[in-house]
Amino acid sequence: MKMDPALRREAADLVAATRALLDECVEEGLEAEVRATAGEVAATPPAPPGSSAQGESSEAETAAAPEVATGNSPRTLEVVRQELGECTRCTLCEGRQQIVFGDGNPNADLMFIGEGPGEQEDREGLPFVGRAGELLTQMVEKGLKIPRSEVYICNIVKCRPPNNRTPLPAEVSACKPFLDGQIDAVQPRVIVALGKPATSLLMGQDVAITRIRGTWLEYRGVPVMPTFHPAFVLRQYTEENRRLVWNDLRAAVDRSRN
């Protein structure tokens, strides 16, 4: 279909005017802001005189336009939890009472990551509320003088492994996207990896926690301080182990505040 000569001239005039405006903006350093608009205008001929189609189209497009995400904002903890759903991605779902997602300040500077829920955590749906959790709470609140509610605590896997065994690779793999989502949502300044399984996952390789604890590492751009799991401290309850964990936690807090 051929365009009416008058409309063609009008379109050409509009393109010329737009290009002139673009040239002026380029001189003032505004090229990026108007080039897209200029291209859209140049590609769209004006509606015929007396027609209301142009206005109707504009209104319809405005009404139907979806909300556009920037793509730079991380998912919130609520969104990550919704994506996890009533997870059946691995066999751990068969023996759990409930999913243990995480607990604490969604904007915490300090994030603790353990390996998996225990029996009491499975019953209550909260991480670190058993004997190991009580010790961790004492370390945070009495030792570091930080309310537990001001840190964020979660585990590698969100369901209790049978007999509290170490999570298997397939179970870790199934939960890893949600752990990464939690880290991205909270955006902690420092992560404390509690024990060998958590540290091994974050480092992508098997590590010896007795050798690597107290050494600064990094995961997803976040500094990581590996230390002993509270359950290990309870089993090997010595002044030396308590001192080492205390030193690790103190270093993590100091770095989170700098």
Image (cartoon, rainbow, N blue to C red):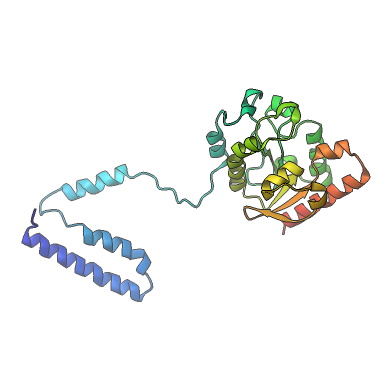
In the figure, residue 148 lies in which quadrant? top right
Relative image position of residue 135 (x, y in whole percent): 82, 37
Question: In the drawing, does residue 122 fall left or right of residue 24?
Answer: right
Residue 108, x across and y down, in percent: 67, 47
For this view, does 235 lie left or right of residue 110? Answer: right
- Name the residue nearer the viewer: 55 or 43: 43
Front residue of this view, candidates 138 and 238: 238
Residue 109 appears in the rendering = no
Q: Is residue 44 visible?
A: yes
Residue 134 x %, y %? 80, 35
Q: Residue at x 82, y 51 (%)?
A: 211
Q: Nearer the viewer, residue 257 or 158?
A: 158
Residue 162 sits above or below residue 204 on the image = above
Q: Quadrant of the C terminus?
A: bottom right
Q: Quadrant of residue 27?
A: bottom left
Q: Tell me how many marks there are.
A: 0
Q: Quadrant of residue 39?
A: bottom left
Q: Position of residue 83 (x, y in %)?
A: 53, 35
Residue at far right of view: 239
Residue under the image location 83 percent in, 39 percent down: 232
